[in-house]
Image: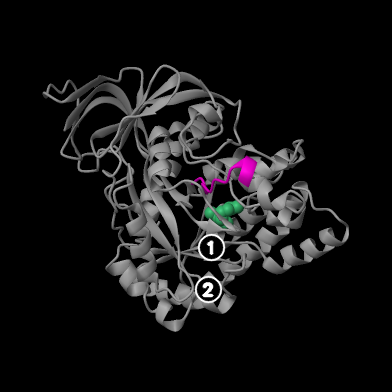
């Protein structure tokens, strides 16, 4: 399978230029002017961008959680990814009690086998931190190609600070990266008790129960563990101005704290919890949506480099049947999470680039190039010779009105319903094969389920 993309504007993390791209046998083979190779797929991309496929390093595919399971499986989730211009997914792999980390990796690989439509990798999540599990870090990094490890400071399956320290020490030896969900569980438990006593249990109080200070404290504490160990950490789904200030403080002191944010924390705010008819439940996620002030601060963090990645935290639960099944009378029982894998690129372009909040090049960095570097995806993240031909031909002028019925995620709502988008993918390629294309008024999947493969990643090399 060969592809020749003619006359597009190739966008990198540092600039843009007009050239042709020729890909054959999964790889980008040549970039130059007036290339004249025969190819199976020849596309005129004049007036369009040629972007590296986006990488989503934060998804919860089929994750059992809060009495139910996140609804996208590897097939529906990666079809939606392809339709959104996401060509690599790095999914969380939650270790079960009694399971080893390596067994957890093999278990989730077996769920993905034959189902993935784009490439994927896994971050093992340490939930049963026996000494022999911590000792598996070496094999996970060096043999299994999974050098990033998730821990939670909240939820029933959280780890304590001692475990965090041990994991930071162990990952430091082999080029691993610890990823942390940073919220202070005791602040949240205290707020839950206060709100329960006052009968304040509607979705709005989910946000009240998890104040910015809970994130601020946990980020600061995690950063201190990094200072102590000389290791490194990556804060997932950073949501607040206060949390960002702690990331920045650590970084200014030379401590290796990295962080991602997500479109929902850049674009939505706590007013959403007031939507009528239990509508606020659609936004029950942790951490919760914050204020417009935090939205603005996070855009600033992307521009300053204090935030290096934008991911989705894709974790879909139907509004009808899941969000309302357990939590109609108590926000604490509403499954936490929201969909997003398919809307990542369109939102960052339309709300970020078009509105002048970030440059096109910075968008490429936080969605692709920087993400690949952070997570050791050495063949991904750039339109460059030798890299995988994971490409998006993107029309910056194509309009799209976001609506659930035209998206592919396995869920009955999108938090961005009705948002008018400027700029959509025209064609998406995964290792040189067209997997999705614009089809009049929406994206269509044209790839092959099962063609995606597990990508072994490289140890962390600094950022
Ligand atoms: O609410 C969320 N974010 N659900 C998914 C699990 C997590 O904490 O990332
Ligand atoms: Zn989380
Ligand atoms: Zn998550």
Observer-nearest of 251 and 407: 407
Residue at x 64% of width, y 53% of height:
287
Residue at x 52% of width, y 58% of height:
64
Badge 2: residue crowd in 10 Å (few <14, some 14–19, many ≥20): many
Residue 166 is marked as none
Q: Quadrant of the C terminus?
A: bottom left
Count of numbered circles in the view:
2
**Relative to residue 30, is residue 458 depicted above or below?**
below
Report the magenta stretch's main SS. Answer: loop
User: Marks 1/2: CA distance?
Assistant: 9 Å
Residue for badge 1: 180
Residue at x 51% of width, y 30% of height:
353
Q: Secondary structure at mark 2?
A: helix
Start-end of magenta stretch: 311-321
Residue 364 in view: no
Residue 164 is marked as 2
Q: Is residue 42 magenta?
A: no
Badge 1: residue crowd in 10 Å (few <14, some 14–19, many ≥20): many
């Amino acid at each position: 399978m060969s592809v020749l993309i003619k006359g597009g504007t190739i966008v990198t993390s540092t600039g843009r230029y007009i050239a042709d791209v020729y890909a054959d046998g999964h790889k980008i083979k040549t970039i130059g002017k007036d290339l004249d190779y025969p190819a199976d797929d020849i596309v005129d991309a004049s007036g369009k961008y040629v972007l590296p496929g986006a990488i989503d390093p934060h998804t919860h595919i089929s994750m059992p959680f809060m009495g139910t399971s996140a609804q996208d499986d590897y097939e529906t989730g990666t079809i939606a990814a392809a339709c959104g211009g996401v060509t690599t997914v790095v999914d969380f792999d939650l270790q079960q009690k009694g399971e080893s980390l390596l067994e957890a990796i093999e278990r989730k690989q077996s769920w993905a086998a034959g189902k993935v439509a784009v490439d994927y990798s896994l971050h093992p999540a340490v939930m049963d931190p026996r000494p022999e599990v911590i000792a598996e870090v070496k094999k996970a990094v060096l043999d299994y190609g999974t050098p990033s490890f998730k821990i939670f400071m909240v939820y029933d399956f959280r780890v304590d600070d001692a475990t965090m320290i041990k994991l930071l020490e162990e990952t430091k030896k082999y080029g691993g990266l610890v990823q942390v969900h940073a919220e202070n569980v005791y602040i949240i438990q205290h707020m839950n008790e206060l709100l329960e006593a006052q009968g304040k249990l509607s979705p709005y109080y989910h946000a009240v129960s998890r104040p910015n200070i809970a994130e601020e404290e946990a980020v600061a504490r995690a950063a201190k563990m990094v200072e102590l160990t000389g290791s490194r950490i990556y804060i997932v789904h950073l949501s607040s101005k206060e949390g960002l200030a702690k990331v920045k403080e650590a970084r200014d002191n030379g401590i290796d704290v990295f962080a991602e944010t997500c479109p929902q924390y850049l674009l939505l705010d706590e007013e959403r919890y007031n939507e009528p008819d239990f509508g606020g439940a659609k936004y029950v996620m942790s951490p919760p949506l914050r204020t417009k002030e935090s939205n603005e601060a996070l855009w600033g963090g992307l521009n300053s480099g204090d935030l290096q990645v934008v991911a989705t935290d894709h974790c879909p639960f139907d509004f009808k049947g899941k969000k309302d099944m357990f939590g109609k009378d108590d926000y604490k029982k509403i499954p936490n999470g929201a969909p997003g894998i398919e809307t990542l690129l369109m939102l960052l372009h339309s709300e970020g680039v078009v509105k002048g909040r970030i440059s096109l090049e910075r968008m490429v960095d936080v969605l692709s190039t920087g993400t690949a570097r952070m997570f050791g995806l050495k063949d991904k993240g750039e339109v460059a010779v030798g890299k995988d031909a994971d490409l998006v031909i993107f029309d910056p002028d194509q309009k799209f009105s976001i609506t659930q019925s035209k998206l592919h995620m396995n869920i009955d709502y999108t938090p961005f319903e009705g948002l008018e988008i400027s700029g959509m993918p025209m064609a998406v390629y995964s290792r040189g094969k067209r997997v999705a294309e614009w089809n009049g008024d929406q994206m269509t999947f044209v790839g092959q389920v099962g063609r995606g493969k597990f990508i072994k990643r490289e140890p962390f090399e600094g950022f």
